[in-house]
Image (spheres, rainbow, N blue to C red):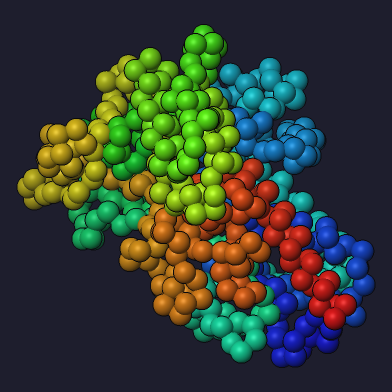
Amino acid sequence: MKIDTKVGIENFEFEFAFIGSGISSTFTLLHFLEQIKDKPFNVPLRIGIFDKEKDFFTGIPYGKRSGTSSLLITSLKNFLPQPELGKFIIWLTENKISLLKEFKEEGGELIREWFSDNRQAIAENAWEDLFIPRYFFGRYLTQVITQSINEYEERKIVKVDLIQLTVENIIPLAQGYEILGASKSYLANNVIFCIGSPPPKKVWNKNLNGENHLNLFADPYNKGMNTTISEIKKFLETNNNSNFNALIIGSNASALEVLFMMNDNTYISNRIQKFTFISTHGLLPDSINSKEHNKVFMARNLLELENKVDLTAKDIADAAFADLDLAEKMGIGAATSVVPISKAFGVLLNKLDKSELEIFACHFGNEVGRRQRCAGVFYLQTINRLQTLNKFEHIAGRFLSIVPINSFTYSFKYLDTRSKTEVLYKDPINIIINCIGSETLNEPISNLYTNLINSGLCVPNPSYKGFKVNSNFEASNNFYIIGPLLSGNVINNKAVWHVEHCGRIIAFSKILGVNLSKSVLYSMEA
């Protein structure tokens, strides 16, 4: 297919190919379209959006694969920045009757409690402090981008194709790229790689799922969270064991979500005797911001560095860890300490040169962040309820392996964080769900990532959580990275890590959208 336009290259199907269609892709496209809305084109710009799933524009977090009972891990006001927050609240208010009706019909016991607790706020459209269902935002985003695409297609500015394809490789050509699937290939001048984080880490090797008394989920989102919950329920129904135990590897947002949805299903929560988390630090996210502690807690160690000469990334990280230790000794959780600590080291980061910023982004940012995790009180109430029933345990350790006890019983080994010794867990385990997080780019990963690295098209940065990019977000010429794989870079003199946060994604997507529009407009004028 040929593009007859000054900005196209003959025989290239797409001017821009977006690999992945989650919120990084969607917001980048929205900002790009806004920049070119008044520009004349001889023929529409061809844009291809590729995704292996049908959840275009939502990705995993805000689409069907997260399930209809999943809530935001933060309050809405901490999830979305302005002006997006204001726009979304208007849409929520206009559509709340149909949205809430569906949510209530799909949910279980915990969702009914959510409605009861938030009834007044919903009636008053006081959305900012609520932990709303995540798919509400996915619905909103899909509507906004679809309307925008339709408008620009009607005006002959763009032609957008949605292509369901598992991309296996992207090959650089003399000019442009070839995008390869199992049986199809496409050509593009520019590639925007927004596929998200690498696949989940593999924590067991043997496929033991065929065993009658063991049910494994290497990735609870793979088939969709609703399907995972249905499969757990079916497993419980087809086994007569009355003492089921479930292990969730990790204590991050995904782990909290899995636990919440399992307990939203009354049948599952009643059949499982105990839920166990295992994570390195054995710590849960915090939800309570204490006004009393806010008055007495200061990031003393970080503040002492304000006048230090020759400041390094390690200096800042060590001081941040010392302040986190201090907060823990005072009984102060992350929801209270996160603001003063983050504000203090944010000021100090501005004093570092680029090389030290890269060190912080690659080696320290995520480590500090792991100890600053916060979550919605509604998710943590589920754990509190289980603890009162003696149905919850949290182990500080690293999962090692599944261990057969006898022909019908399994448990697991772990490396205890405190003693540094291997321990065999005392109880049998029937259900194991992996929520440990993504593989790093120096581990065995999917073919696509491996191919990009082996070809030299993308080079992992020292964090091995992201690819190196230049100031234009390019990993290679006209090959752009956006989303979580920006982690470990310095962009606009800012150290970047943990790019899963929606506000950060929106901010970076806006910059990239503007950059892409400039490249197109420059080509038109050339």
Q: Nearer the viewer, residue 222 or 303?
A: 303
Q: What x and y, as percent, mark residue 501? A: 57, 44
Q: What x and y, as percent, mark residue 2? A: 76, 89
Q: Does residue 431 appear in this view?
A: no
| Point 64% across, 25% down: residue | 129
| Point 32% across, 21% down: residue | 387
| Point 79% across, 72% down: residue | 520
Q: Nearer the viewer, residue 129 or 229?
A: 129
User: Residue pushed farthest left?
Assistant: 406
Q: Name the image quarter holding the C terminus.
A: bottom right
Q: What x and y, as percent, mark residue 478? A: 65, 74
Q: Is residue 154 left or right of residue 250?
A: right
Examine the image and state in which quarter residue 252 appears: top left
Q: Does residue 114 appear in this view?
A: yes
Q: Nearer the viewer, residue 256 or 95?
A: 256
Above or below, 223 relative to 444: above
Above or below, 386 relative to 521: above
Q: Name the image quarter holding the N terminus.
A: bottom right
